[in-house]
Amino acid sequence: MAKNMTGERRKYFRLDVSAKVVFKVKDKKTLNLPREAYESFSKNISIEGVCFISPTAPKLHKAIELKIYLPGEKRAINLVGKTKWCRVVKKEDGEKVFEVGVELSTISKTEEGRFIGYVSSKMAAHLGKYLHL
């Protein structure tokens, strides 16, 4: 993928959003068994992806289920995606956590409007500072 004018390789603008995220890595071997859910928070989101902080490093290119509680919303948005990248980050106290990038692939029609509406409104507000809207 070619870089855009700011040097980014992403197709869509990322919004810095700290939202509660609950995630489970899907595994064909344990499809019918309960999988451990982890709770964390997002670092940023876009129309097609989410970056979140994780206490564990999920395997790359694996399906992952996400529940995102967007700021101001009481109900989670259920998303499914694939882990695209993961990198170690050290917190101020020296503890290691992981930043995980997920490319979104599935969202229900009923929740698609809520998710896209939230991202679009935040993007418009952000760009409005530059466009004097």
Image: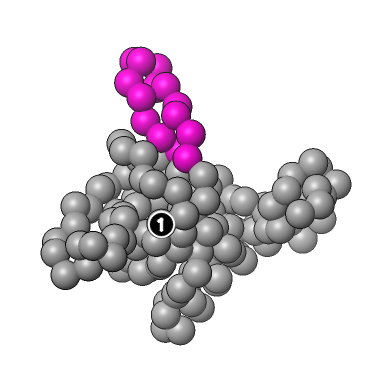
**Residue 35 magenta:** no
Q: Position of residue 38 (x, y in %)?
A: 25, 48
Relative to 7, say whether 108 is above or below.
below
Q: Residue furthest left?
A: 33
Q: Quadrant of the C terminus?
A: bottom right
Q: Secondary structure at mark 1?
A: loop
Q: What residue do we see at 50% from left, 78% from top?
A: 113
What's under tag 1, amino acid-wise? Answer: Lys
| Lateral position of residue 80 relative to residue 131, left or right | left
Relative to 22, say whether 116 is above or below.
below
**Residue 98 magenta:** yes
Q: Which residue is mark 1?
A: 62
Q: Which residues are magenta?
A: 86-99
Q: Residue furthest front?
A: 29
- Neighbour class for label 1 at 10 Å: few (<14), some, many (≥20)? some
Q: Quadrant of residue 13?
A: bottom right
Q: Position of residue 117 (x, y in %)?
A: 55, 71
Most frequent secondary structure within the magenta stretch: strand
Q: Is any atom of residue 28 visible in this view? A: yes
Q: What residue do we see at 45% from left, 63% from top?
A: 81
- From the viewer's side, name the closer residue of 36 and 132: 36
Q: Position of residue 55 (x, y in %)?
A: 30, 36
- From the viewer's side, name the closer residue of 117 and 4: 4
